[in-house]
Amino acid sequence: MPRPSGTGAHPDRAAQIGEGFVIHRALPSRQRRMVGAWCFLDHAGPAEFGEGQGLRVGPHPHIGLQTFTWMIEGEVLHRDSLGYEQLISPGQVNLMTAGRGIVHAEDTPNASAGRLHAAQLWIALPDAERHREPAFQNYPNLPVVDAGGFRITVLVGTAFGETSPVPAYSPLVGLDLVATGAGAQSVPLDAGFEYAALTLRGEVEIDGEQLAPGTLMYLGAGRTHLSLRCAGLAQLLIIGGVPFDEEILLWWNFVGRTQAEIEAATHEWNHNGERFGEVRGSTSPRLAAPDMAGLQIKASRGR
């Protein structure tokens, strides 16, 4: 089939979070700001770390979004200002709804050496939902389908006749596909969604185009299926959703609609933080928001 307009592939880029832990950022990028309501995608690992060198992301705030953590290997301890303390293990999703404001911290649960492989995504909340009360939920049981040599986990939305229990405020889908050997599968898609795929491990051929590890391919909208092939061990994340009609501003850990709103949230966090509450139990230092002096935030839009 002809490739829909606006598609293309690009490598992710290295970034640093917390106390020096290196991750790879696929969204946002110069080539693509959003995919449906998905506005952020970090890929951590797969990586080995030494004693005392795991994930240490100190208390930091969010507004106007949901954080969506998919754990593949290792464990991370989530703590937030609502009082939740949740260990997320492989095969689980943590969904935190920031709404009007929340604070959380993410730490490797002990100081010993280990392994970590995870993806964290942000979902922009639509205007009608972005001031809602904050919330948190862990989802330990997700639907899994074996097809064409791939083990497919339905992270959110509906696919392959299965529906994830993870809720969404915008029409979304998220799939994790793992092959331990050669695989070939046609993935059914919703023509009204736009999609992107990120190679997490190994190489995957998508509609005849070979993607190296750490490559995000924007697939556009209008597709009814996606042809996947791999020759050996490979892992792929597919995200999609209805193109997000609202214009958003994304800066640091905030999603807003106006520059003034982002500036107010930054000032509140750096100077008192009463709006956000506090996280108890994390040993990692509190993160300060960067100075916004003279900065004009660039708007993002799904279409």
Image (cartoon, grey):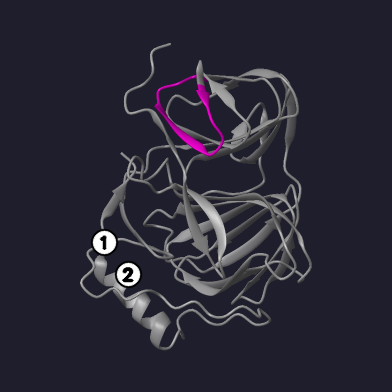
Image position, residue 60 (x, y; %): 51, 73
Which dot marks residue 278? none
Q: Nearer the viewer, residue 1 or 134?
A: 1
User: Do callouts 2 and 1 mark residues in contact (Cβ within 8 Å)?
Assistant: yes
Closer to the eye: label 2 or 1: 1
Numbered mark located on residue 262 in the image: 2
Q: In the image, what residue occupies the spot 42% across and 66% down?
A: 131
Image coordinates for residue 33, horizontal then vertical, percent:
36, 46
Instruction: Name the side, left or right, on which 71 lies relative to 294.
Output: right
Q: What residue type is labelled 1?
A: Ile
The magenta stretch spans which residues? 210-225
283 relative to 137, above or below: below
Is residue 80 positioned above or below 143 on the image? below
Please identify the residue farthest to the bottom as the structure is shown.
272
The chief SS type of the magenta part is: strand
Q: Which amino acid does label 2 sit on?
A: Ile
> Taking 84 as reference, is 11 left or right?
left
Which is more toward the observer, 187 or 199? 199
State the residue position of label 1: 297
Q: Distance between the residues labelled 2 and 1?
A: 9 Å
